[in-house]
């Protein structure tokens, strides 16, 4: 038996199994959507592979019924934690009317669903971080027991919106957790040309704690985020968590990472794949054995296949609806 | 009923609405302790406290983005941009976010937010305290863009803006703040957007304007009346939604149309109004559609001679009206 790291974090074996299941779902959804893109069946894909531990680990620290998620486009694993299903993901991928984020209006991976407390997002970078600050201000004003989380890449930390939100959160000691998924590349631009100093250290300048962790270690990602969520819930203000990770595919299906990353570097990080790493842990603490893992993998693949099938059969939005929901009270012209 | 200046009407409406709805928040630069550089929020920090009256950091992008977040969580933020000229750092939040959130979420989310901003020139404000920015925002579906010209309308339209389910850009011409005084009813009322006001009836010429320009047009119209030329002056009040019905009805009667606006003439509000008149009432016209707007220089220069050159005045509007009337 390996050393138990999860019990002291307050995680039970059933939590670990569910976290593992969500990582698998994200990975298999991703592999499937990438293949669909290459087959010409999905025009645009934002891959998540490599980020599963950072996303599931950090999202698991929040309470689904009351906390609020302000994700960015790479956060498929995160929205699966927040209640999305593979069918939801593929409805978005295919632009179907049942896409919960937008009814097929937005590109895939622009997550949002009010009933799951996932705030609608866009393509301009880091705009959601200011929305998270406004929502956190609202929660504090209303004295609601709610913590807001917002996720972004290290490229997002260059935007003025991000600094504005950090500043505002620090001034008002908001119940807000900033989570940076630092995968070292903003499309092609390396962290060394993006970030002066270190992301997590910037929190110090805004008057609240920042910490860095191993984003390919789901328990480390959970631990750091949970501490931040607990602080926020206790009224002790915001935190910044930087989770170092790596994306296995290109930025999107329209990108070609061979123009800026060596195959050796990608291979080196694939060896640190968060999923086999977590499997190793699950086996070492006697949570799952090889057979159980195999069974869960098969089950997740089936769930993904079912999602692709259901979304494939779903309807496209009717163009006669395209003028709706422009305004709340002004009719179509 | 009391006579109020336009700024007093804005101030009093904000107070009334803050008292009425605890979800309403005021935020912006200097809105708290200072009560706003134009005193629109004077006394509100004392009455409503710092939780609801937020002196924000000097970051217009933050002001808009935080207000959007508040609105997403069902508060009713009324943000102030200190000068319309400074709204551009917030452009992305307003245009990419506030305007598109209802549409992109297929109605799942909405942004009931008001952004107030003093605009316009003739106050020695030079390039960066004089701009008219309404055309940038009126171009964007999802936003409502309004500009009251009277104290009475300022109250009714601001109340409407605060009640409105969508993001509203509420532009107040800073020269009207203390120049314009009129009767403001004590009771609460709203003026629905998309309803122009006919400020003066006439049969010879239709003159469309909004904001400060409405007053100059009405003055010029009075001068022409002395010579027996009757100009119908229409105050759009709301730029989007745009009340073309009132404009077209008037043009059908007068057969001549001019549009007067302080913003850059090229692709300004007048271009849209003019195009719609041409599309829908071409055969009613007895003369060319005339647009009077700002010259094509980046913004209003400072020196009094240069400002006078840039800024429309009643004399110039009168001349243009006479020319068109005689056409």
Image (spheres, grey):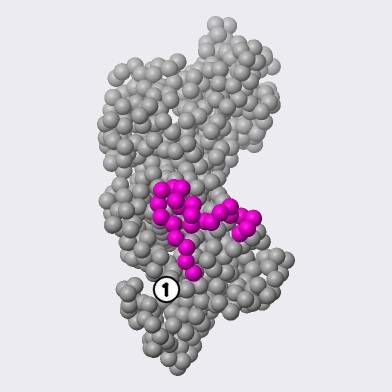
Q: Could you tell me if residue A118 is visible in this image?
A: yes
Farthest residue, direction right: A259
Quadrant of residue B207 within the rendered picture: top right
Quarter holding the N terminus of chain B?
top left
**Closer to the camera, B229 or A235?**
A235
**Picture residue at 40% right of the left edge, 64% below the top:** A225
Query: What residue did someone put label 1 on?
Result: A219
Estimate the x, y position of residue B283 in percent, counting from the top left: 66, 30
Residue A151 at x, y percent in the picture: 47, 60
Q: Can residue A306 be seen by looking at this rendering?
A: no
Mark 1 surroundings: few (<14), some (14-19) or many (≥20) residues within 10 A: many
**Residue at the image position 39 percent from the left and 19 percent from the top:** B5
Please tell me whether residue B64 is drawn above or below residue B227 in the rendered image: below
Pick the residue in front: B75 or B215: B75
Q: Position of residue A27 (x, y in %)?
A: 53, 77
Residue segment shown in magenta: A191-214
Q: Chain of mark 1?
A: A
The image quadrant of residue A40 is: bottom right
Residue A217 locus on image (x, y percent):
47, 73
Left or right of A60? Residue A77 is right
On whether residue A296 falls in the magenta region, the answer is no
Residue extending farthest bottom: A291
Q: Is residue B17 above or below residue A319?
A: above
Camera-nearest residue between B89 and B278:
B89
Q: Residue at x 39, y 89 (%)?
A: A1
How many numbered tags mark residues here?
Answer: 1
To which quarter of the image does residue B115 belong?
Answer: top left
Q: Secondary structure at mark 1?
A: helix
The quarter of the picture where the C terminus of chain B appears is top right
Residue situated in front as seen by the camera: A106 or A212: A212
Q: Residue at x 70, y 65 (%)?
A: A260
């Amino acid at each position: 038996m390996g050393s138990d790291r999860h019990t002291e974090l307050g995680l039970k074996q059933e939590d670990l199994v569910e976290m593992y299941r969500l990582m698998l779902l994200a990975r298999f959804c991703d592999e499937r959507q990438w293949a669909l893109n290459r087959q010409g069946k999905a025009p645009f894909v934002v891959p998540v592979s490599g980020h599963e531990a950072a996303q599931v680990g950090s999202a698991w620290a929040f309470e689904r019924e009351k906390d609020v998620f302000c994700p960015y486009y790479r956060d498929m694993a995160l929205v699966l934690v927040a209640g999305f299903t593979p069918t939801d993901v593929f409805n978005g991928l295919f632009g179907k009317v049942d896409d919960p984020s937008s009814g097929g209006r937005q590109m895939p991976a622009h997550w949002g669903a009010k009933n799951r407390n996932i705030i609608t997002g866009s393509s301009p970078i880091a705009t959601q971080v200011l929305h998270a600050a406004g929502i956190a201000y609202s929660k504090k004003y209303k004295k609601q027991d709610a913590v807001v989380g917002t996720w972004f890449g290290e490229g997002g930390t260059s935007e003025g919106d991000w600094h504005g939100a950090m500043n505002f959160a620090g001034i008002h000691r908001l119940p807000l957790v900033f989570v940076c998924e630092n995968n070292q590349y903003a499309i092609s631009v390396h962290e060394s040309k993006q970030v002066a100093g270190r992301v997590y250290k910037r929190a110090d300048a805004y008057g609240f704690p920042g910490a860095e962790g191993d984003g390919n270690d789901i328990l480390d990602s959970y631990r750091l985020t949970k501490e931040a969520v607990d602080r926020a819930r206790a009224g002790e203000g915001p935190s910044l968590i930087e989770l170092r990770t790596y994306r296995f595919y290109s930025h999107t299906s329209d990108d070609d990472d061979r123009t800026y990353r060596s195959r050796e570097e990608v291979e080196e990080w694939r060896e640190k794949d968060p999923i086999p790493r977590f499997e190793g842990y699950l086996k070492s603490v006697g949570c799952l054995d090889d057979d159980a893992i195999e069974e869960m993998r098969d089950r997740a693949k089936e769930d993904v296949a079912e999602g692709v099938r259901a979304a494939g059969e779903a309807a496209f939005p009717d163009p006669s609806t395209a003028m709706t929901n422009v305004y709340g009270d002004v009719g179509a012209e | 009923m009391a006579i109020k200046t336009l700024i007093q009407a804005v101030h009093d409406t904000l107070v009334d609405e803050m008292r009425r709805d605890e979800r309403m928040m005021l935020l912006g630069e200097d809105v708290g302790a200072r009560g706003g550089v134009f005193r629109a929020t004077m006394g509100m920090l004392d009455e409503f406290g710092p939780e609801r009256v937020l002196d924000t950091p000097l970051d217009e992008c933050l002001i808009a983005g935080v207000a959007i977040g508040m609105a997403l969580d069902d508060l009713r933020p009324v943000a102030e941009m200190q000068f319309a000229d400074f709204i551009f750092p917030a452009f992305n939040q307003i245009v990419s976010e506030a305007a598109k959130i209802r549409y992109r979420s297929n109605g799942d989310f909405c942004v009931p937010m008001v952004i107030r901003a003093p605009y316009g020139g003739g106050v020695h404000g030079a390039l960066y305290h004089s701009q008219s920015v309404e055309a940038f925002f009126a171009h964007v579906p999802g936003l409502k863009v309004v500009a009251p010209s009277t104290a009475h309308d300022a109250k009714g339209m601001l109340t409407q803006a605060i009640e409105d389910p969508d993001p509203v850009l509420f532009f107040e011409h800073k020269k009207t703040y203390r120049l314009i005084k009129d009767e403001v009813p004590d009771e609460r009322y709203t003026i629905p957007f998309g309803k122009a006001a006919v400020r003066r009836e006439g049969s010879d010429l239709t003159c469309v304007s909004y904001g400060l320009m409405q007053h100059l047009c009405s003055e010029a119209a009075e001068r022409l009346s002395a010579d027996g030329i009757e100009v119908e002056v229409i105050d759009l009040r709301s730029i989007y939604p745009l009340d073309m019905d009132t404009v077209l009805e008037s043009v059908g009667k007068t057969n001549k149309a001019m549009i007067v606006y302080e913003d850059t003439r090229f692709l300004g509000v007048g271009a849209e109004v003019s195009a719609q008149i041409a599309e829908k009432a071409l055969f009613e016209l007895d003369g060319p559609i005339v647009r009077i707007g700002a010259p094509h220089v980046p913004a209003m220069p400072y020196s009094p001679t240069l400002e006078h050159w840039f800024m429309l005045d009643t004399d110039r509007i009168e001349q243009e009206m006479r020319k068109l009337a005689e056409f």
